[in-house]
């Protein structure tokens, strides 16, 4: 591994970590957006994870700018790259920019000023879903809205735990990350490694600022699906094992966080299940049932946190994983009617009526 450094004694306002692996098609636009930030007191750390395409040559184009640094390392995966970046950074705050995404020019400056104004552990903004083909378009994701903005304590505002772990539309106080041992799980070739980092941040943060603006374009053109990769079926399970390990080794409000983690696991497992190919789904549903039963037997589950249809599905999985899988596969392609049919099969008319009341806000 080699590291090229500039201004080794500098302490910039923001360190921007850019993990890079074979993304030459989008990398130049990404790094140009970092170079163009109106907040100029930054360092941009490019972590080249053993790229074999033209990515390293593109990085070289930016090294004339003394704010840019590069870490060249053998390929070890996202978690390893991010942890090397965290160890190398020197900024007051740390940001993450995925190498196929790009930032508005005012993004870092706006977030940094808001973080400083409230001495925030983390400042989190919304983001845009972005497509460049077949024609350029973008839409706000809605992670942050006008109804939930400003300074919050995450453990008093549980929504942050259940929303998409979009760790790259935020800034994190570096001292907060270091004091709380917040880093990534290093699993070669794994997925979901943003999930554990995201959970640790919200579990430990006391001061978080939510910003009803969007600065980052989260590219959808480059969505590489892993639905047919047997090696990635259980990566999500590894992340949740890491979250439990973290809680076990840190002083946390377990009475609050354990039930939250149960709800998070259900949502993540279902998202993983839905992305898998049919044969891998049939395999994974049994692991889902096993982990859900373990949580219930330990008294960790609070079904008041679950929407009715999620509670029903979770119990159906534990009761008969194979039957749940058959019904779920049979309902696919049927849209809302297919989902309604599966709910009827699971809980009959009472469950359907309960779900209808919740959808109408009558819960």
Image: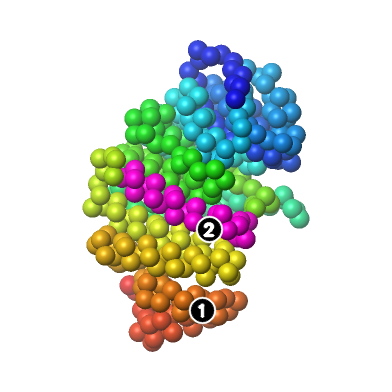
What's the residue at 75%, 34% (across, down)? 54
The residue that disc 1 covers is 326
Residue closest to the eye, 279 or 211: 279
Residue 151 colored in magenta in the image: no
Judged left or right of residue 108, residue 313 is left
Q: Position of residue 211 (x, y in %)?
A: 45, 43
Within 10 Å of disc 1 (Cα), the crowding (few <14, some 14-19, many 20+) is few
Coloring scheme of the render? Answer: rainbow
What element does badge 2 sit on?
loop
Q: Is residue 4 above or below residue 358?
A: above
Q: Position of residue 33 (x, y in %)?
A: 65, 33
The residue that disc 2 covers is 233
Q: Position of residue 334 (x, y in %)?
A: 58, 79
Q: Which residues are magenta?
A: 225-247
What's the residue at 37%, 34% (across, down)? 181
Residue 240 colored in magenta in the image: yes
Q: Position of residue 262 (x, y in %)?
A: 34, 58
Within 10 Å of disc 2 (Cα), the crowding (few <14, some 14-19, many 20+) is many
What's the residue at 61%, 22% (across, down)? 2
Residue closest to the eye, 345 or 238: 238
The numbered mark, 1 or 2, whose residue comes first in the sequence reads 2
Q: Is residue 188 above or below residue 345?
A: above
What secondary structure do most residues of the magenta stretch adopt?
A: helix
Judged left or right of residue 8, residue 265 is left
Q: Is residue 25 above or below residue 292?
A: above
Q: Is residue 169 visible?
A: no
């Amino acid at each position: 591994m080699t590291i090229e450094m500039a201004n080794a004694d500098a302490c910039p306002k923001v360190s921007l970590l850019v993990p890079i692996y074979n993304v030459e098609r989008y990398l130049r636009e990404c790094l140009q957006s970092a170079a163009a930030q109106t907040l100029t007191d930054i360092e941009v750390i490019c972590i080249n994870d053993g790229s074999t395409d033209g990515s390293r040559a593109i990085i070289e184009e930016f090294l004339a700018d003394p704010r840019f640094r590069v870490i060249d390392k053998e390929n070890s995966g996202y978690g390893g790259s991010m942890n090397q970046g965290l160890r190398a950074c020197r900024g007051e705050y740390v940001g993450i920019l995925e190498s196929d995404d790009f930032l508005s020019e005012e993004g870092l400056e706006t977030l940094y000023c808001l973080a400083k104004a409230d001495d925030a552990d983390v400042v989190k903004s919304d983001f845009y879903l972005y497509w460049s083909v077949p024609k350029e378009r973008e839409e706000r994701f809605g992670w942050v809205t006008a109804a939930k903005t400003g300074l919050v304590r995450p453990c008093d505002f549980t929504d942050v735990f259940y929303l998409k772990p979009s760790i790259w539309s935020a800034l994190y106080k570096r001292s907060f990350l270091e004091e709380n041992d917040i880093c990534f799980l290093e699993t070669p070739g794994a997925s979901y490694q943003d999930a554990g980092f995201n959970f640790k941040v919200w579990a430990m943060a006391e001061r978080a600022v939510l910003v009803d603006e969007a600065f980052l374009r989260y590219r959808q053109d480059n969505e590489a699906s892993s639905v047919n990769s047997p090696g990635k079926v259980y990566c999500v399970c590894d992340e949740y094992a890491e979250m439990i390990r973290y809680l076990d080794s840190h002083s946390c409000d377990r009475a609050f966080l354990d039930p939250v983690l149960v709800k998070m696991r259900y949502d993540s497992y279902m998202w993983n299940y839905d992305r898998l190919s049919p044969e891998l789904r049939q395999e994974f549903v049994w692991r889902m049932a096993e982990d859900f039963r373990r949580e219930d037997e330990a008294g960790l589950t609070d079904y008041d946190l679950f929407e009715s249809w999620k509670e029903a599905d979770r119990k159906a999985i534990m009761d008969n994983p194979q039957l749940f899988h058959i019904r779920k596969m049979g309902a696919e392609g049927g849209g809302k009617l297919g989902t309604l049919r599966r709910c009827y099969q699971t809980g009959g008319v009472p469950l359907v009526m309960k779900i209808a009341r919740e959808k109408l806000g009558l819960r």
